[in-house]
Amino acid sequence: MPWSGRSITRRISESYVLRAAAAMLAGAASAAAFAPIHAVPVLLVSFPILAWLISTGGLRRAFWTGWAFGLGQFAAGLYWIGASFVYTGQFGWIAGGIGVAGLSAGLAVFPASAALVARTFDSLPRRLVALGAAWVLAEGLRSWLLTGFPWNLTGQVWAFSVETLQPAAWIGTHGLGAVTVFAALAPAALASRRLRLGLLLPAPLAAVLFLGFLRDNVRTLDLGEGPVVRIVQGNVPQAARLDADRFDDNLRQYVVTSRTPPADPPPKLVIWPEAVVPFDPTGREDIRRNVRDVQQAIPGDVRLATGGFRIRPADGSVFNSLFFLAPDGQVEAYYDKVHLVPFGEFLPLAAWLPDVLLPMTGRGMQAADARARVSIPGFPPVAPAICYEIIFPTSTGGPERPAWLLNVTNDAWFGRTSGPYQHFAQARLRAVEEGLPVVRAANTGISAVIDARGRVLARLPLGQRGVIDHPLPVPEKPPLHARMGDVPLFGALFALLVLMLATIRQKPAAADAAKD
Protein backbone atom coordinates (compact mmCIF):
# COMPACT_ATOMS: atom_id res chain seq x y z
CA MET A 1 0.00 0.00 0.00
CA PRO A 2 1.51 3.35 -1.06
CA TRP A 3 0.38 5.14 2.13
CA SER A 4 1.06 2.46 4.73
CA GLY A 5 2.73 3.42 8.00
CA ARG A 6 6.05 2.01 6.87
CA SER A 7 5.81 3.90 3.58
CA ILE A 8 5.12 7.20 5.34
CA THR A 9 8.04 6.81 7.74
CA ARG A 10 10.33 5.94 4.82
CA ARG A 11 9.19 9.02 2.90
CA ILE A 12 9.83 11.23 5.93
CA SER A 13 13.27 9.78 6.58
CA GLU A 14 14.34 10.20 2.95
CA SER A 15 13.00 13.71 2.38
CA TYR A 16 14.79 16.75 3.79
CA VAL A 17 11.58 18.79 3.70
CA LEU A 18 9.37 16.16 5.35
CA ARG A 19 12.04 15.40 7.94
CA ALA A 20 12.35 19.08 8.87
CA ALA A 21 8.56 19.53 8.93
CA ALA A 22 8.09 16.50 11.17
CA ALA A 23 10.80 17.68 13.55
CA MET A 24 9.37 21.19 13.66
CA LEU A 25 5.86 19.93 14.37
CA ALA A 26 7.16 17.64 17.12
CA GLY A 27 9.05 20.54 18.66
CA ALA A 28 6.00 22.82 18.47
CA ALA A 29 3.88 20.13 20.11
CA SER A 30 6.39 19.79 22.96
CA ALA A 31 5.83 23.47 23.84
CA ALA A 32 2.35 22.51 25.07
CA ALA A 33 4.04 20.89 28.07
CA PHE A 34 4.92 24.34 29.46
CA ALA A 35 2.64 26.79 31.24
CA PRO A 36 -0.22 27.48 31.03
CA ILE A 37 -1.24 24.17 29.38
CA HIS A 38 1.20 21.77 31.09
CA ALA A 39 0.33 18.90 28.73
CA VAL A 40 3.36 16.93 29.95
CA PRO A 41 2.39 13.60 28.26
CA VAL A 42 3.01 15.22 24.86
CA LEU A 43 6.73 14.79 25.59
CA LEU A 44 6.25 11.03 25.35
CA VAL A 45 5.54 11.55 21.65
CA SER A 46 7.70 14.53 20.68
CA PHE A 47 11.03 13.28 22.08
CA PRO A 48 10.73 9.76 20.60
CA ILE A 49 9.99 11.36 17.23
CA LEU A 50 13.14 13.45 17.58
CA ALA A 51 15.15 10.35 18.54
CA TRP A 52 13.83 8.45 15.52
CA LEU A 53 14.46 11.31 13.09
CA ILE A 54 18.09 11.81 14.12
CA SER A 55 18.65 8.05 13.80
CA THR A 56 17.77 7.98 10.10
CA GLY A 57 20.65 10.05 8.74
CA GLY A 58 24.20 11.20 9.26
CA LEU A 59 25.66 13.85 11.54
CA ARG A 60 24.70 16.79 9.35
CA ARG A 61 21.10 15.64 9.08
CA ALA A 62 20.98 15.07 12.82
CA PHE A 63 22.13 18.62 13.50
CA TRP A 64 19.54 20.21 11.23
CA THR A 65 16.82 17.88 12.49
CA GLY A 66 17.57 18.98 16.05
CA TRP A 67 17.61 22.58 14.87
CA ALA A 68 14.16 22.21 13.26
CA PHE A 69 12.81 20.61 16.46
CA GLY A 70 14.20 23.50 18.52
CA LEU A 71 12.84 26.07 16.08
CA GLY A 72 9.34 24.62 16.48
CA GLN A 73 9.58 24.42 20.26
CA PHE A 74 10.91 27.94 20.76
CA ALA A 75 8.61 29.57 18.22
CA ALA A 76 5.54 27.96 19.79
CA GLY A 77 6.72 28.49 23.35
CA LEU A 78 8.01 32.05 22.98
CA TYR A 79 5.46 33.51 20.56
CA TRP A 80 4.31 35.89 23.30
CA ILE A 81 7.53 37.92 22.99
CA GLY A 82 6.17 39.24 19.71
CA ALA A 83 3.29 40.90 21.58
CA SER A 84 5.68 43.46 23.07
CA PHE A 85 6.54 44.76 19.59
CA VAL A 86 2.99 46.07 19.18
CA TYR A 87 4.06 49.17 21.13
CA THR A 88 7.01 49.91 18.83
CA GLY A 89 5.05 51.25 15.86
CA GLN A 90 2.51 50.63 13.12
CA PHE A 91 4.12 47.41 11.92
CA GLY A 92 4.81 46.05 15.38
CA TRP A 93 3.27 42.64 14.76
CA ILE A 94 5.45 42.14 11.69
CA ALA A 95 8.54 43.16 13.63
CA GLY A 96 7.45 40.90 16.47
CA GLY A 97 7.12 37.92 14.17
CA ILE A 98 10.57 38.55 12.72
CA GLY A 99 12.00 38.97 16.21
CA VAL A 100 10.51 35.71 17.51
CA ALA A 101 11.67 33.86 14.39
CA GLY A 102 15.20 35.20 14.75
CA LEU A 103 15.39 34.43 18.46
CA SER A 104 14.00 30.92 17.94
CA ALA A 105 16.45 30.25 15.13
CA GLY A 106 19.36 31.25 17.35
CA LEU A 107 18.19 29.29 20.39
CA ALA A 108 17.58 26.22 18.22
CA VAL A 109 21.34 25.77 17.94
CA PHE A 110 21.31 24.26 21.44
CA PRO A 111 18.93 21.34 20.72
CA ALA A 112 20.72 20.93 17.38
CA SER A 113 23.98 20.44 19.24
CA ALA A 114 22.36 17.85 21.51
CA ALA A 115 21.06 15.96 18.47
CA LEU A 116 24.53 16.04 16.90
CA VAL A 117 26.11 14.58 20.04
CA ALA A 118 23.48 11.84 20.21
CA ARG A 119 24.02 10.84 16.57
CA THR A 120 27.69 10.08 17.19
CA PHE A 121 26.48 6.84 18.84
CA ASP A 122 25.36 4.00 16.57
CA SER A 123 23.86 1.91 19.35
CA LEU A 124 20.24 2.86 20.09
CA PRO A 125 20.56 2.57 23.90
CA ARG A 126 23.66 4.77 23.92
CA ARG A 127 22.04 7.21 21.51
CA LEU A 128 18.98 7.66 23.72
CA VAL A 129 21.06 8.12 26.86
CA ALA A 130 23.36 10.54 25.02
CA LEU A 131 20.39 12.54 23.74
CA GLY A 132 19.01 12.96 27.26
CA ALA A 133 22.38 13.94 28.73
CA ALA A 134 23.33 16.28 25.87
CA TRP A 135 19.88 17.91 25.90
CA VAL A 136 20.22 18.96 29.55
CA LEU A 137 23.84 20.07 29.08
CA ALA A 138 22.71 22.20 26.14
CA GLU A 139 20.00 23.76 28.31
CA GLY A 140 22.69 24.51 30.88
CA LEU A 141 24.76 26.32 28.24
CA ARG A 142 21.67 28.23 27.11
CA SER A 143 21.16 29.33 30.70
CA TRP A 144 24.65 30.80 30.87
CA LEU A 145 26.00 31.91 27.48
CA LEU A 146 25.57 35.58 26.46
CA THR A 147 24.03 36.47 29.87
CA GLY A 148 21.80 33.38 29.64
CA PHE A 149 18.18 32.68 28.76
CA PRO A 150 16.92 29.83 31.00
CA TRP A 151 13.32 30.16 29.84
CA ASN A 152 11.17 27.07 29.22
CA LEU A 153 13.75 24.59 30.47
CA THR A 154 12.38 21.05 30.35
CA GLY A 155 12.13 20.80 34.14
CA GLN A 156 9.70 23.72 34.18
CA VAL A 157 6.91 21.55 32.77
CA TRP A 158 6.24 20.29 36.32
CA ALA A 159 5.31 23.70 37.77
CA PHE A 160 1.59 22.91 37.76
CA SER A 161 1.54 21.05 41.10
CA VAL A 162 3.11 21.46 44.51
CA GLU A 163 3.97 17.75 44.65
CA THR A 164 5.71 17.69 41.27
CA LEU A 165 7.69 20.81 42.18
CA GLN A 166 9.33 19.30 45.25
CA PRO A 167 12.21 17.41 43.54
CA ALA A 168 13.64 20.79 42.52
CA ALA A 169 14.69 21.24 46.16
CA TRP A 170 17.23 18.43 45.71
CA ILE A 171 18.10 18.30 42.00
CA GLY A 172 17.04 21.73 40.76
CA THR A 173 15.22 22.60 37.56
CA HIS A 174 17.97 21.11 35.39
CA GLY A 175 17.93 17.85 37.35
CA LEU A 176 14.17 17.68 37.02
CA GLY A 177 14.64 18.28 33.30
CA ALA A 178 17.18 15.45 33.04
CA VAL A 179 14.92 12.79 34.56
CA THR A 180 12.03 14.12 32.44
CA VAL A 181 13.88 13.83 29.12
CA PHE A 182 15.13 10.33 29.95
CA ALA A 183 11.57 9.27 30.82
CA ALA A 184 10.19 10.87 27.65
CA LEU A 185 12.59 8.76 25.57
CA ALA A 186 11.33 5.50 27.09
CA PRO A 187 8.71 4.91 24.33
CA ALA A 188 11.51 5.00 21.75
CA ALA A 189 13.28 2.18 23.60
CA LEU A 190 10.08 0.15 23.98
CA ALA A 191 9.22 0.59 20.29
CA SER A 192 12.63 -0.90 19.47
CA ARG A 193 11.99 -3.84 21.83
CA ARG A 194 14.54 -2.65 24.38
CA LEU A 195 12.32 -3.60 27.33
CA ARG A 196 14.98 -3.26 30.00
CA LEU A 197 16.02 0.20 28.81
CA GLY A 198 12.38 1.22 28.38
CA LEU A 199 11.73 0.43 32.04
CA LEU A 200 15.00 1.91 33.29
CA LEU A 201 14.72 5.34 31.64
CA PRO A 202 11.56 6.50 33.49
CA ALA A 203 12.64 5.03 36.84
CA PRO A 204 14.53 8.15 38.11
CA LEU A 205 11.54 10.39 37.33
CA ALA A 206 9.14 8.04 39.11
CA ALA A 207 11.45 7.96 42.13
CA VAL A 208 11.84 11.73 42.52
CA LEU A 209 8.14 12.37 41.97
CA PHE A 210 7.31 9.82 44.66
CA LEU A 211 9.79 11.43 47.05
CA GLY A 212 8.34 14.83 46.16
CA PHE A 213 4.88 13.57 47.08
CA LEU A 214 6.22 12.39 50.43
CA ARG A 215 8.00 15.69 51.06
CA ASP A 216 4.85 17.71 50.50
CA ASN A 217 2.51 15.44 52.45
CA VAL A 218 4.63 13.96 55.25
CA ARG A 219 7.25 16.51 56.27
CA THR A 220 5.37 19.57 57.46
CA LEU A 221 6.46 23.13 56.84
CA ASP A 222 6.88 25.53 59.74
CA LEU A 223 3.78 27.72 59.63
CA GLY A 224 5.31 30.58 61.60
CA GLU A 225 4.77 33.93 59.91
CA GLY A 226 6.48 37.30 59.73
CA PRO A 227 5.22 40.85 59.29
CA VAL A 228 2.38 41.58 56.87
CA VAL A 229 3.17 42.84 53.37
CA ARG A 230 0.77 44.44 50.92
CA ILE A 231 1.19 43.68 47.21
CA VAL A 232 -0.46 46.24 44.93
CA GLN A 233 -1.52 45.21 41.42
CA GLY A 234 -2.61 48.39 39.66
CA ASN A 235 -3.38 46.69 36.32
CA VAL A 236 -2.22 49.67 34.25
CA PRO A 237 -2.20 48.75 30.52
CA GLN A 238 1.14 49.01 28.78
CA ALA A 239 -0.15 51.60 26.32
CA ALA A 240 -1.03 53.87 29.25
CA ARG A 241 2.37 53.29 30.87
CA LEU A 242 4.09 54.47 27.70
CA ASP A 243 1.94 57.61 27.40
CA ALA A 244 3.90 60.45 29.03
CA ASP A 245 0.69 62.47 29.50
CA ARG A 246 -0.73 59.73 31.74
CA PHE A 247 2.25 59.21 34.06
CA ASP A 248 0.61 61.14 36.91
CA ASP A 249 -2.71 59.30 36.47
CA ASN A 250 -0.96 55.92 36.47
CA LEU A 251 0.90 56.76 39.65
CA ARG A 252 -2.27 58.03 41.26
CA GLN A 253 -4.01 54.75 40.42
CA TYR A 254 -1.39 52.93 42.45
CA VAL A 255 -1.79 55.35 45.34
CA VAL A 256 -5.58 54.93 45.36
CA THR A 257 -5.34 51.13 45.15
CA SER A 258 -2.75 51.13 47.95
CA ARG A 259 -5.22 52.98 50.21
CA THR A 260 -7.55 49.96 50.34
CA PRO A 261 -8.54 49.58 54.04
CA PRO A 262 -6.34 46.90 55.63
CA ALA A 263 -7.26 44.04 57.91
CA ASP A 264 -5.71 43.53 61.34
CA PRO A 265 -2.75 43.49 61.68
CA PRO A 266 -2.03 46.15 59.04
CA PRO A 267 0.81 45.76 56.56
CA LYS A 268 4.25 47.14 57.34
CA LEU A 269 5.48 47.19 53.74
CA VAL A 270 3.57 48.20 50.58
CA ILE A 271 5.05 46.78 47.38
CA TRP A 272 4.59 48.28 43.93
CA PRO A 273 5.79 46.46 40.79
CA GLU A 274 8.65 47.19 38.41
CA ALA A 275 9.04 50.75 37.10
CA VAL A 276 5.77 52.05 38.54
CA VAL A 277 7.65 55.28 39.26
CA PRO A 278 8.91 56.40 35.80
CA PHE A 279 11.82 58.42 37.24
CA ASP A 280 14.39 58.45 40.03
CA PRO A 281 12.41 59.04 43.27
CA THR A 282 15.44 60.23 45.23
CA GLY A 283 14.63 63.60 46.77
CA ARG A 284 11.24 63.88 45.05
CA GLU A 285 8.62 65.75 47.08
CA ASP A 286 5.78 64.24 45.01
CA ILE A 287 6.85 60.74 46.02
CA ARG A 288 6.93 61.74 49.68
CA ARG A 289 3.37 63.05 49.30
CA ASN A 290 2.30 59.73 47.79
CA VAL A 291 3.80 57.83 50.73
CA ARG A 292 1.94 60.07 53.14
CA ASP A 293 -1.29 59.45 51.21
CA VAL A 294 -0.82 55.72 51.63
CA GLN A 295 -0.04 56.13 55.34
CA GLN A 296 -3.36 57.92 55.90
CA ALA A 297 -5.17 54.67 55.11
CA ILE A 298 -2.73 52.27 56.80
CA PRO A 299 -1.93 52.85 60.48
CA GLY A 300 1.60 52.67 61.81
CA ASP A 301 4.94 53.23 60.14
CA VAL A 302 4.49 51.96 56.60
CA ARG A 303 7.36 51.56 54.16
CA LEU A 304 7.07 51.46 50.39
CA ALA A 305 9.02 49.35 47.90
CA THR A 306 8.65 50.47 44.30
CA GLY A 307 10.29 49.94 40.97
CA GLY A 308 11.83 53.00 39.34
CA PHE A 309 14.87 54.23 37.48
CA ARG A 310 18.01 55.27 39.29
CA ILE A 311 20.31 57.80 37.66
CA ARG A 312 23.96 57.74 38.70
CA PRO A 313 25.02 61.40 39.09
CA ALA A 314 28.64 60.74 38.15
CA ASP A 315 27.98 59.72 34.55
CA GLY A 316 24.22 59.81 34.02
CA SER A 317 23.95 56.00 33.74
CA VAL A 318 20.41 54.70 34.13
CA PHE A 319 19.59 51.61 36.23
CA ASN A 320 16.38 49.63 36.47
CA SER A 321 16.03 49.69 40.24
CA LEU A 322 13.92 48.78 43.21
CA PHE A 323 13.71 51.53 45.83
CA PHE A 324 12.83 51.10 49.50
CA LEU A 325 11.28 54.24 50.96
CA ALA A 326 11.10 55.05 54.67
CA PRO A 327 7.83 56.24 56.26
CA ASP A 328 8.89 59.84 55.59
CA GLY A 329 9.29 59.10 51.86
CA GLN A 330 13.09 59.21 51.82
CA VAL A 331 14.98 56.49 49.93
CA GLU A 332 16.70 54.35 52.57
CA ALA A 333 17.90 51.52 50.30
CA TYR A 334 17.87 50.47 46.67
CA TYR A 335 18.75 47.53 44.45
CA ASP A 336 19.96 47.76 40.84
CA LYS A 337 19.05 45.09 38.32
CA VAL A 338 21.88 42.78 37.22
CA HIS A 339 20.38 40.61 34.46
CA LEU A 340 19.12 43.08 31.87
CA VAL A 341 16.88 41.98 28.99
CA PRO A 342 18.87 41.89 25.71
CA PHE A 343 17.46 44.27 23.07
CA GLY A 344 14.88 45.43 25.62
CA GLU A 345 17.01 47.08 28.30
CA PHE A 346 20.39 46.99 26.62
CA LEU A 347 21.81 46.53 23.15
CA PRO A 348 24.39 43.72 22.90
CA LEU A 349 27.75 44.87 21.52
CA ALA A 350 26.51 48.47 21.67
CA ALA A 351 29.95 49.66 22.74
CA TRP A 352 31.28 48.63 19.33
CA LEU A 353 28.61 50.49 17.35
CA PRO A 354 28.96 54.11 16.17
CA ASP A 355 26.39 56.55 17.50
CA VAL A 356 24.69 56.85 14.11
CA LEU A 357 23.70 53.15 14.20
CA LEU A 358 22.24 53.21 17.71
CA PRO A 359 18.44 53.06 18.21
CA MET A 360 16.48 55.82 19.92
CA THR A 361 17.07 54.18 23.30
CA GLY A 362 20.82 54.55 22.86
CA ARG A 363 23.12 51.95 24.36
CA GLY A 364 20.57 51.05 26.99
CA MET A 365 20.64 50.76 30.75
CA GLN A 366 23.55 49.96 32.99
CA ALA A 367 23.69 46.59 34.75
CA ALA A 368 24.77 46.24 38.36
CA ASP A 369 27.79 44.11 39.14
CA ALA A 370 26.18 41.39 41.27
CA ARG A 371 22.97 40.27 42.93
CA ALA A 372 22.70 41.56 46.48
CA ARG A 373 20.45 41.32 49.50
CA VAL A 374 18.84 44.34 51.13
CA SER A 375 18.09 45.01 54.78
CA ILE A 376 14.76 46.69 55.58
CA PRO A 377 13.98 47.81 59.15
CA GLY A 378 11.46 45.45 60.69
CA PHE A 379 11.99 42.74 58.07
CA PRO A 380 14.47 39.92 57.56
CA PRO A 381 17.04 40.38 54.74
CA VAL A 382 15.55 40.16 51.25
CA ALA A 383 17.02 39.31 47.85
CA PRO A 384 15.25 41.41 45.19
CA ALA A 385 14.74 40.09 41.67
CA ILE A 386 13.53 42.57 39.07
CA CYS A 387 11.48 41.16 36.18
CA TYR A 388 13.02 38.03 34.69
CA GLU A 389 15.88 37.94 37.21
CA ILE A 390 13.66 35.50 39.11
CA ILE A 391 14.44 32.82 36.50
CA PHE A 392 18.13 32.88 37.49
CA PRO A 393 19.40 31.08 40.62
CA THR A 394 20.41 33.47 43.40
CA SER A 395 23.10 31.40 45.22
CA THR A 396 21.29 31.64 48.55
CA GLY A 397 22.89 28.71 50.36
CA GLY A 398 25.82 30.61 51.90
CA PRO A 399 26.24 32.62 55.10
CA GLU A 400 24.67 35.72 53.51
CA ARG A 401 21.45 33.81 52.84
CA PRO A 402 18.37 36.07 52.65
CA ALA A 403 15.07 35.10 54.25
CA TRP A 404 12.84 35.79 51.23
CA LEU A 405 12.83 36.77 47.56
CA LEU A 406 11.02 39.86 46.27
CA ASN A 407 10.13 39.72 42.57
CA VAL A 408 8.75 42.91 41.00
CA THR A 409 7.86 42.82 37.34
CA ASN A 410 5.77 44.34 34.56
CA ASP A 411 4.35 41.67 32.26
CA ALA A 412 1.85 44.09 30.74
CA TRP A 413 4.03 44.07 27.60
CA PHE A 414 2.73 40.59 26.78
CA GLY A 415 -1.00 40.91 27.47
CA ARG A 416 -3.04 37.74 27.97
CA THR A 417 -0.52 35.38 26.40
CA SER A 418 1.31 32.42 27.89
CA GLY A 419 4.29 34.63 28.83
CA PRO A 420 3.02 35.82 32.24
CA TYR A 421 2.00 32.27 33.18
CA GLN A 422 5.43 30.89 32.26
CA HIS A 423 7.08 33.68 34.26
CA PHE A 424 4.94 32.88 37.30
CA ALA A 425 5.67 29.15 37.03
CA GLN A 426 9.39 29.87 37.19
CA ALA A 427 8.94 31.99 40.32
CA ARG A 428 7.35 28.96 42.02
CA LEU A 429 10.28 26.78 40.97
CA ARG A 430 12.75 29.31 42.33
CA ALA A 431 11.02 29.23 45.72
CA VAL A 432 11.42 25.44 45.94
CA GLU A 433 15.01 25.43 44.67
CA GLU A 434 16.10 28.06 47.17
CA GLY A 435 13.85 27.05 50.04
CA LEU A 436 12.72 30.66 50.29
CA PRO A 437 9.30 32.32 50.05
CA VAL A 438 8.70 34.55 47.04
CA VAL A 439 6.63 37.73 47.20
CA ARG A 440 5.71 38.70 43.65
CA ALA A 441 4.27 42.05 42.56
CA ALA A 442 3.28 42.26 38.87
CA ASN A 443 1.63 45.29 37.30
CA THR A 444 -1.08 43.33 35.45
CA GLY A 445 -0.51 39.98 37.19
CA ILE A 446 0.19 37.38 38.27
CA SER A 447 0.94 38.77 41.76
CA ALA A 448 1.24 36.27 44.58
CA VAL A 449 2.71 35.16 47.89
CA ILE A 450 4.50 31.81 47.47
CA ASP A 451 5.89 29.84 50.39
CA ALA A 452 9.21 27.97 50.46
CA ARG A 453 7.54 24.80 49.14
CA GLY A 454 6.06 26.52 46.11
CA ARG A 455 2.54 26.70 47.53
CA VAL A 456 0.58 29.74 46.34
CA LEU A 457 -0.82 31.21 49.56
CA ALA A 458 -2.49 34.19 47.90
CA ARG A 459 -2.68 35.49 44.34
CA LEU A 460 -4.25 38.06 42.04
CA PRO A 461 -5.03 36.72 38.56
CA LEU A 462 -3.92 38.25 35.31
CA GLY A 463 -5.76 41.44 34.37
CA GLN A 464 -7.26 42.26 37.78
CA ARG A 465 -6.71 45.32 39.96
CA GLY A 466 -6.40 44.85 43.71
CA VAL A 467 -4.18 44.20 46.72
CA ILE A 468 -2.91 41.20 48.65
CA ASP A 469 -2.33 41.50 52.39
CA HIS A 470 -0.47 38.49 53.72
CA PRO A 471 2.10 37.69 56.41
CA LEU A 472 5.58 37.02 55.11
CA PRO A 473 6.14 33.22 55.06
CA VAL A 474 9.18 31.82 56.81
CA PRO A 475 12.15 30.30 54.94
CA GLU A 476 13.32 26.71 55.17
CA LYS A 477 16.83 25.52 55.82
CA PRO A 478 18.84 25.64 52.57
CA PRO A 479 17.82 22.58 50.52
CA LEU A 480 20.42 20.48 48.73
CA HIS A 481 20.19 22.42 45.48
CA ALA A 482 20.64 25.78 47.21
CA ARG A 483 23.87 24.43 48.73
CA MET A 484 25.25 22.45 45.80
CA GLY A 485 23.88 24.13 42.68
CA ASP A 486 23.94 22.41 39.28
CA VAL A 487 27.66 21.67 39.03
CA PRO A 488 27.37 18.05 40.29
CA LEU A 489 24.58 17.32 37.82
CA PHE A 490 26.37 18.81 34.83
CA GLY A 491 29.59 17.09 35.86
CA ALA A 492 27.86 13.71 36.05
CA LEU A 493 26.15 14.13 32.66
CA PHE A 494 29.39 15.25 31.01
CA ALA A 495 31.27 12.34 32.56
CA LEU A 496 28.60 9.95 31.29
CA LEU A 497 29.05 11.19 27.72
CA VAL A 498 32.83 11.00 27.94
CA LEU A 499 32.65 7.47 29.35
CA MET A 500 30.38 6.29 26.54
CA LEU A 501 32.65 7.89 23.93
CA ALA A 502 35.72 6.30 25.51
CA THR A 503 34.20 2.81 25.41
CA ILE A 504 33.32 3.27 21.74
CA ARG A 505 36.97 4.00 20.93
CA GLN A 506 38.20 1.05 22.98
CA LYS A 507 36.16 -1.52 21.04
CA PRO A 508 38.03 -1.15 17.70
CA ALA A 509 41.35 -1.23 19.56
CA ALA A 510 40.34 -4.43 21.34
CA ALA A 511 39.28 -6.01 18.06
CA ASP A 512 42.61 -5.15 16.42
CA ALA A 513 44.49 -6.64 19.37
CA ALA A 514 42.51 -9.86 19.05
CA LYS A 515 43.45 -10.13 15.37
CA ASP A 516 47.14 -9.75 16.17
Image: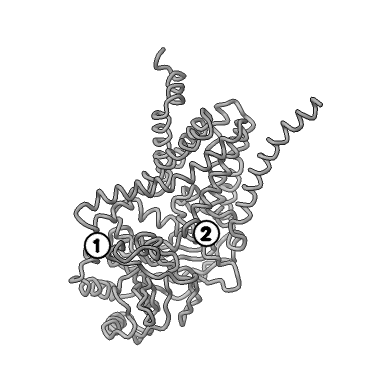
Which one is in front in this view, the residue at disc 1 or the one at disc 2?
A: 1
Left or right for 3, reference 203: left
State the quadrant of the C terminus: top right
Q: Residue at x 80, y 27 (%)?
A: 514
Question: Picture quarter containing residue 76?
Answer: top left
Residue 499: mark in rendering: none
Residue lying farthest to the top in this orientation:
1
Q: Residue at x 59, y 36 (%)?
A: 120
Type of amino acid at the residue the image marks with label 1: Pro
Gap in Å between the C-alphas at discs 1 and 2? Answer: 31 Å
Q: Where is residue 116 in the image (x, y as percent from the top left)?
A: 53, 39
Reply above or below: 433 against 118.
below
Q: Residue at x 40, y 66 (%)?
A: 351
Q: Position of residue 374 (x, y in %)?
A: 48, 76
State the quadrant of the N terminus: top left
Q: Which of marks 1 and 2 is nearer the N terminus?
A: 1
Reply above or below: 414 against 293.
above
Question: Picture quarter containing residue 87?
Answer: bottom left
Q: Can residue 455 be seen in this view?
A: no
Q: Residue at x 43, y 80 (%)?
A: 333
**Residue receiving disc 1:** 237
Q: What element carries label 1?
A: loop
Q: Position of residue 327 (x, y in %)?
A: 36, 85
Type of amino acid at the residue the image marks with label 2: Val
Q: What element carries label 2?
A: helix
Left or right for 11, reference 118: left
**Residue receiving disc 2:** 432
Q: Where is residue 58 in the image (x, y as percent from the top left)?
A: 53, 31
Left or right for 157, reference 290: right
